[in-house]
Image: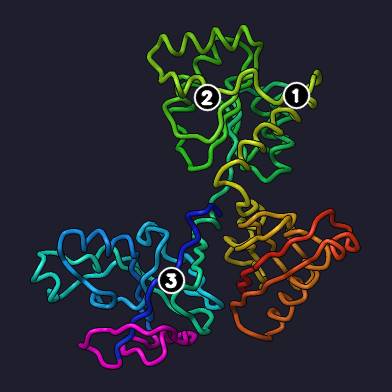
Amino acid sequence: MSGNNIGRLIAINISEKRGTKKHGVDSVRLIENWGLENDAHAGNWIRQVSLLPLEKIESFNEKGAGVKYGEFGENLVVSGFDLKRLSVGSRIIIGDSVLRITQIGKECHSHCEIFERMGECIMPYEGVFAEVLLGGEIRAGDKVTVVPANRLKSINRMILCGGGHVSSAVLGMARTLGFETVVIEDREEFSEKLKNEGADKVICKDFSTALKELPETEKDYYVVLTRGHYFDVDALKEILKKDFLYVGMMGSRKRAAMVKEELKACGYDEKAVEGLHSPIGLSINAETPEEIAVSIMAEIISVKNEGEQKGNIEKVVAEYIEDANHEPAVLCQIIEKHGSAPRSVGTTMLVKKNEIISTIGGGRAEAEIINLARDMLDGKGNRVELGAFTMNNAEAYDDGLLCGGSIRVLFERI
């Protein structure tokens, strides 16, 4: 979860009667499955709380609108992110309360005073609506954290072009690290071999055709390990037309330079071509296919963890959640990290009655998290909970960890 998932609660607005303007309050109690206490629009429906981004209000007011907080009918004004870019199902955490987005925008059946004056109103397309999953007191100035819903379905995908010995070794490591794996190979015998070794998908076609037909995802990593220069260029010409997080090609420095010059001569963007990782992998004097695979995966992990992909939900956790027949479990997700806690924001763990899937750091903190999650499975507490877990350096050492720090965790019974 990157920095743009953190914002601030700027203003709170309520109205005791429908049809009247909302007025500001310093604090309010959010009531689970209801909305803001004493607000006329609260109720057991999908639009319990309305939110608008500060930045959109300010932009609208630059046109001379002079609109004050609450006059759009919004309950909460938040800063730091574009709300309408979130998906339905995203969680918004304010203080010790949790909201779930239920609707993006709304249809206006009659024009409001602002529309009559300005010819437009931002609420229909900039506002979002939410239900209260976990209630509590909120105050103007509180930190706001967003947990996007699409984190549950956003899985890293590796596309291996070529099916030789190095591909086989990379495939095994990629699967262990939770990547969805796609292998493209134009030779039937090699395709069958990689299929038997557990590739999620094997495409037995020429590289150009297969890559043209392969739909993109937002988190693609391309590894080009073909048997020759011609096939490398053939694959890269299609890959460089796509969006990707990483593309690397195996070969010597001389071969890499030749391929890059050929791609530039074909009109490909120079910056994109220079971004090609070739020779592929970190320099560890690797010789065997397995050692080369280690160097490749180490480079990919480094690239993956440098940016916003850090701490994404593990494939095994996502697959469990998406299985409609899964047994009850509690999803535990780190939403804040302070100090040197071992796992990053966004890391998830599933707690089942008799099984734990993945880890969010180990040690005493994880034991406490598991105990709380199992209490939730037994029906204690709420369906959604928040918890803060601190481990100082002495405790971390005693529990076998090398560092301390603290984390804040979102628990959801699923």
Query: In the rendered structure, which amino acid carries the disc numbered 3?
Result: Leu
Query: In the rendered structure, which amino acid carries the disc numbered 2?
Result: Gly
Q: Nearer the viewer, residue 317 or 22?
A: 22
Residue 114 sits in quarter:
bottom left
Q: In the figure, is residue 326 to the left or right of 97?
A: right
Q: Residues within 10 Å of mark 2 (few under 14, many from 20)?
A: few
Q: Is residue 38 magenta?
A: yes
Q: Is residue 342 magenta?
A: no
Q: Earlier in the sequence, mark 2 or mark 3?
A: 3
Q: Main secondary structure of the magenta part?
A: loop
Q: Name above or below for residue 53 compared with residue 297.
A: below
Q: Nearer the viewer, residue 340 or 74?
A: 340
Q: Which residue is mark 3?
A: 9
Q: Name above or below for residue 363 compared with residue 372.
A: above
Q: Residue furthest right?
A: 398
What colour scheme has been applied to the protein in the rendered image?
A: rainbow
Q: Secondary structure at mark 3?
A: strand
Residue 79 in the image: state x and y as whole percent: 40, 63
The residue at the point 68 percent across, 80 percent down is: 376
Query: In the rendered structure, which amino acid carries the disc numbered 1?
Result: Ile
Q: Residues within 10 Å of mark 1 (few under 14, many from 20)?
A: many
Q: Secondary structure at mark 2?
A: loop
Q: Which residue is mark 1?
A: 292
Which mark is in front, 2 or 1? 2
Q: Give me the disc on residue 361.
A: none
* Magenta-drawn segment: 16-44
Q: Earlier in the sequence, mark 1 or mark 3?
A: 3
